[in-house]
Each structure stands twice: as structure tokens, then as C-alpha cells.
Amino acid sequence: MADPKIDCSEAVFDFGSRDASEVVSHTFELKNTGTSDLVIKAVRPACGCTTAQLDKSVIPPGESSKLGAQLSLAGRSGEVQKPILIESNDPANPALQLTFKGVVGADFEFVPSILTLRKDSPESPATATTILRSLKNEPLEILNAKSNSGKLKIRWDKLPDVNAFQITANLEGRFQLGQYGDKIVLETNHPIRKQIEISVIIIVPAPISVAPLKIVLDAGASEPVSRTIILKNPTNEALQIDKIETPETTMTSKIETMGNFGSRVIIGNIIPKSDLAENSIRIILSSGRVIRIPFALKEKP
């Protein structure tokens, strides 16, 4: 009787000891050692951390098919075993299990683990920093750094007395509204980790509506006045104010919410003075964005 027979000479791939930031790649070879066509019905990785791609699903007798697989080690530690189930028409072995196995241990850490650059507007620059540290206290030098997009300017500064660096990414140029992914690749002199990667997120939020854009005061007025600033977030995201900074300690500030996406800021006890024209109100949002509303003096006719 003619039957297909599935065989894999290396059904378990031992990737050894790897860092948690790596992605392990391996190609499994599936061979039909039977006497009729072997049909691969399904390839089922154990979870979303594993992906697999088969180059052909029908394998004639004596021929092979390659299965390219990748395992992301992000967020894992210790011993790891991740199976990939291969379902076929082999009557004797309808479900063949392939396995990634190894040990995950971090050699380095980033704090924070992801660089997030938030632009206040499509045209404004953005900067973010992270600390790269050797967890095994091994000597390390960074030789070069580049981003996949080529749009980031990257510098690295060695921290004193430790095997650690501060990595700074600067972003300039106009970006459309939205969220973008990028990656920084550090080239090092480490004997094993010649390249270390940092994930980057670039956020260009929709502008917040601010009115007025200037606080206009009558020059020469002697009585304190108050002014109201309205802020609205057009993206239907909650607008939260963390802090209000005034140029004079005698000024007062009050925040009133306007529904879920807006706020009314009332600045009180403003005494019009000539030096106010060089200062502004700073409204600091929970997202880290800073909104500045300058003062302007208007001469009386």
C-alpha cells in the first residue's frame, strides 16, 4: 500500500543561550520518505511569539520542503520550549511536533525598554533617551549607531564608572499625523553581541486647540486682571493637565474640565507689567506636551 511518511532529521532545534532581545531563526526540513505524495494540511505554532512559513505543502516521495520559523524571545527568561505542530496526511504520524528549545538570559537592559519620541506638531523636533547597561558588567564600547529609517540622529555618551551608555535619539523634519515604528541598531565590540537593537516609536498627535494664542493685556493698567484659556483635544482622547507654571508667583491658576476632551484654565491676579511681554504661561499635560501661551501688552490709544 502506498503511503506518505513525514520525517524531520532535526525536529528539535536547540538555540543554546540567547539574550531576551533576540529573535531566533531556523529552517526545519520536512522530508517525505514514503511512497505517495505527502500533503501538509496545517502548520500550527504554539503562540503568537512563533511564526512559520512553508515553501510548499505537497511533497512528492523522496523530496523535501523547507519550513522557515522564527521565535521572538522578548519578555522571556529561563528555559524555553516552543512547539510547532505539523498536520499532514501521514497515517502513522498525522501530527508531527517540531520544537524550539534553549535558555533565555538577558545580557543587557534598556531603561526605558522602548524609545518614544513624541512631536508636539508635525514640524517640531523630538528627543528621547534610554540607558543601555551590561547586566554582566562586561566591558562594552559602541562603535556606531544608525536607525532603520535613517531619520534619527543618534549619539551615545558613556556613563562614569559603569559599563553603561546614555543613548539619545533626535528627530527633525515634518511627519504626518500618526504613529510610526523604527529601530536603532548599535554596533559594538562585544564578542557575542555585535549588534544591539532598540525599538523606537514615533508619535505625531493631532494638535490641541488653544484659545487665545496670546494673553493680551492693557499696558499701564494698575488693577489685577484674570484671563481664561480654553484647551480642546480634537482626537477624542482625554486631555489631562498635570501642572501650570506662571511667570509670577503671585498669579493664581484654576482648572475646570469641559467634558471629557477639554479644559478651561483661569489665570488670576495678573498685574500688567512691561516685563510680562517676555514671559508666558506654561501648561504641562500628562502626555509630556508643553503648551506655551505668551503675554502681549497693548498700548492704550
Image (cartoon, rainbow, N blue to C red):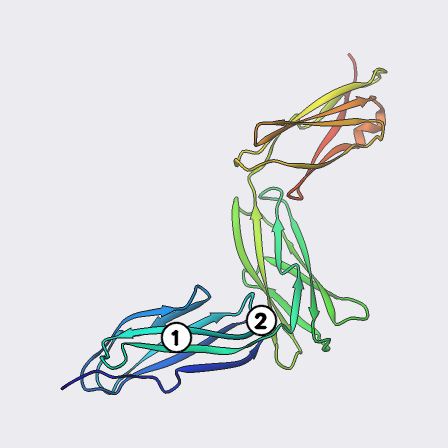
Task: Label 1: state its secondary structure.
Answer: strand
Q: Are marks 1 and 2 in contact (CB under 8 Å)?
A: no
Q: Nearer the viewer, residue 28 or 195?
A: 28
**Which is closer to the viewer, label 1 or label 2?**
2
- Residue at image point 57% right, 48% down: 203
Residue 173 x, y percent position in the rendering: 59, 49
Q: Is residue 225 left or right of residue 44?
A: right
Q: Separation of disc 1 and disc 2 at Cα?
A: 24 Å
Is 8 rendered above or below residue 70?
below
Residue 153 x, y percent position in the rendering: 64, 59
- Residue at image point 85% right, 23% down: 273
Q: Nearer the viewer, residue 244 or 75?
A: 75
- Residue at image point 19% right, 86% down: 35
**Residue 218 visible:** no
Structural crowding at the residue carrying mark 2, measured as other residues with C-alpha within 10 Å and reported as few (<14), some (14–19) or many (≥20): some
- Residue at image point 39% right, 73% down: 84
The quadrant holding residue 6 is: bottom left
User: What amino acid is at disc 1?
Assistant: Gly
**Residue 253 visible:** yes
Residue marked by disc 1? 68
Q: Nearer the viewer, residue 170 or 107?
A: 107
Which quarter of the rendered picture does the C terminus lie within? top right
Residue that extends furthest to the front in the rendered view of this protein: 92
Q: Is residue 110 left or right of residue 244?
A: left
Residue that extends furthest to the top in the rendered view of this protein: 301
Residue 211 x, y percent position in the rendering: 64, 26
Is 85 rendered above or below residue 271?
below
**Disc assigned to residue 179:** none
Q: Nearer the viewer, residue 248 or 143?
A: 248
Is 177 rendered above or below residue 197?
above
The quadrant holding residue 53 is: bottom left
**Disc assigned to residue 77:** 2
